[in-house]
Image: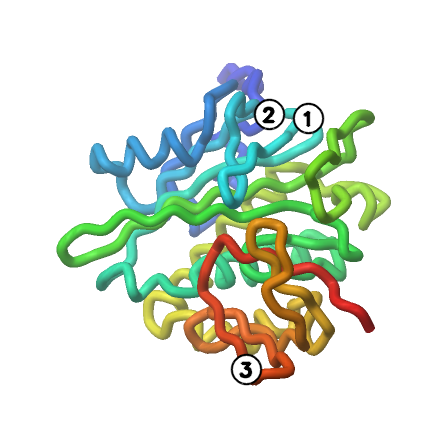
Amino acid sequence: MTEEPPSPLLIDPACLARLLGPSAGRFCVDVLPECASTNSLLLERCAAGAPSGTVLVADRQTAGRGSRGRSWQAAPEASLTFSLLWRFPGGVERLSGLSLAVGVAVVEALAQCGVPDVQLKWPNDILYREGKLGGILVEVQCESDSAQAVIGIGLNLHRPPEFDTSGIALPPVALSDAVAEVPERHEILAALLRTLAEVFDLFADGGFAVLRSRWQTYHAWQDRPVRMLREGQVEAEGTCLGADEDGALLVRTATGLERCLSGDLSLRPGAC
């Protein structure tokens, strides 16, 4: 029997399926050499009826999107970028705190791959030693009896020789800064998908509340002084207490406890 030639793409669906094992049936993986944005394309496929568990991986995104409309810079060989569609029962209000739940899955999947000490910053940054290792972008669509989320995840595997840091609050870091040998990308993606499915099962039953204590454990700025910025202006300062059971940011300020769910709020370290 003649073996199939290896895929010319950075991700080989057959290899990924073998690594997913029994979980492979929960996913439908499509790999593209290039697209504008995996999130944008998957949102279109979601509207056309794509099943829950659809995964879209692209070697290169020409218009990748990060949080607050920023572009996502990613060199193909140096990064892993993909989007995942997942359908949840109930209305959109059931998805409060979903980006934080995704963060829990990312940290725990990377730990399974031998990458230690990865942390999270509210609401969607993945950190290593206070540098930005990756990001999460969650976009939601609603139907009468369910809500669909398209979850985009980008990780820096290797630090590219040139990286535009203008306008970036956190310095970029990569898995190569955390471990001597970066795990193979199929291994990383398989661990991420398996762990995301496990976390989504918990989230569907109990919301972010059942994952809150795990998120707090990985929260980089727990009980640390922070500044809350909106449109570049300091809105408040205080001690970050993490997130409540709905995923809202909690900061104790001089005037009391501030609770914020707004995605246009930025956090920065405060004065010690």
**Of the image marks 1 and 3, the number of the one nearer the N terminus:** 1
Q: CA distance from mark 1 to mark 3?
A: 44 Å
Amino acid, disc 3: Leu
- Percent across and percent down for residue 196 are 48, 55
Colouring: rainbow
- Percent across and percent down for residue 159 are 78, 34
Quadrant in which the C terminus is drawn: bottom right
Residues 157 and 242: in front is 242
Task: Give above or below for 266 relative to 260.
Answer: above
Image point 56% across, 50% down: which residue? Answer: 231
Image point 56% across, 32% down: which residue? Answer: 71
Residue 77 marker:
1
Q: Is residue 64 left or right of residue 222?
A: left
Q: Secondary structure at mark 2?
A: loop
Q: Is residue 120 left or right of residue 116?
A: left
Q: Secondary structure at mark 1?
A: helix
Q: Residues within 10 Å of mark 3 (few under 14, many from 20)?
A: some
Amino acid, disc 2: Leu
Residue beneath label 2, please? 10
In the image, which is nearer the foreground, mark 2 or mark 3? 3
Q: CA distance from mark 2 to mark 3?
A: 47 Å
In the image, which is nearer the foreground, mark 2 or mark 1? 1
- Percent across and percent down for residue 57 are 49, 31
Is residue 107 in view from this perspective?
no
Q: Secondary structure at mark 3?
A: strand
Residue beneath label 3, please? 257
Task: Give above or below for 213 relative to 54.
Answer: below
Residues 82 and 138: in front is 138
Tags 2 and 1 touching, CB below 8 Å = yes
Amino acid, disc 1: Glu
Residue 86 marker:
none
